[in-house]
Amino acid sequence: MQNVIFQDKEVVKREELINTIKKCPFCNSMPKVQNTGYTWQIMCPNVNCCSVASMSARLEDAVTRWNRRVEA
Ligand SMILES: [Zn+2]
């Protein structure tokens, strides 16, 4: 039971993090979020865009990196 509650919190936290992801600074598309099993990847869905994917083992870090670049 406690394990289920913990998992729900994790899902809510992920959704909150995903909601803070900013649009691509180059083409203004909403980025895609993928979990490969080992890393989280945030990437622009536009194949013609020169934006580079943000990757990290932790979703928080991938989001931080992506958003930091948008602000820069
Ligand atoms: Zn883009």
Image (cartoon, grey):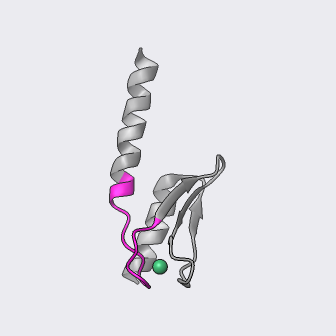
Q: Quadrant of residue 25?
A: bottom left
Q: Which residues are magenta?
A: 17-31
Q: Is residue 5 above or below residue 9?
A: above
Does the stretch in magenta take in 25?
A: yes
Counting every numbered tag in the picture gives 0
The image shows residue 13 at horizontal and vertical percentages of 37, 44
Q: Quadrant of the C terminus?
A: bottom left
Magenta stretch, main secondary structure, is: loop
Which quadrant would the N terminus be assigned to in this image? Answer: top left
Q: Is residue 57 left or right of residue 71?
A: right
Residue at 55 percent of width and 55 percent of height: 34
Q: Quadrant of residue 2?
A: top left
Residue 10 against residue 32 in the figure, above or below: above
Which of the pair 65/32 is nearer the observer?
32
Residue under the point 46% across and 55% down: 60
> Residue placed farthest to the top in the image?
1
Q: Is residue 64 left or right of residue 54?
A: left
Q: Residue furthest front?
A: 47
Relative image position of residue 49 (x, y in whole percent): 53, 83
Q: Position of residue 37 (x, y in %)?
A: 64, 46
Query: Height in image: 65 above or below 41?
Result: below
Where residue 57 sits in the image (x, y, percent)? Answer: 60, 53
Q: Which residue is at a point 33% across and 50% down the rendered structure image?
A: 16
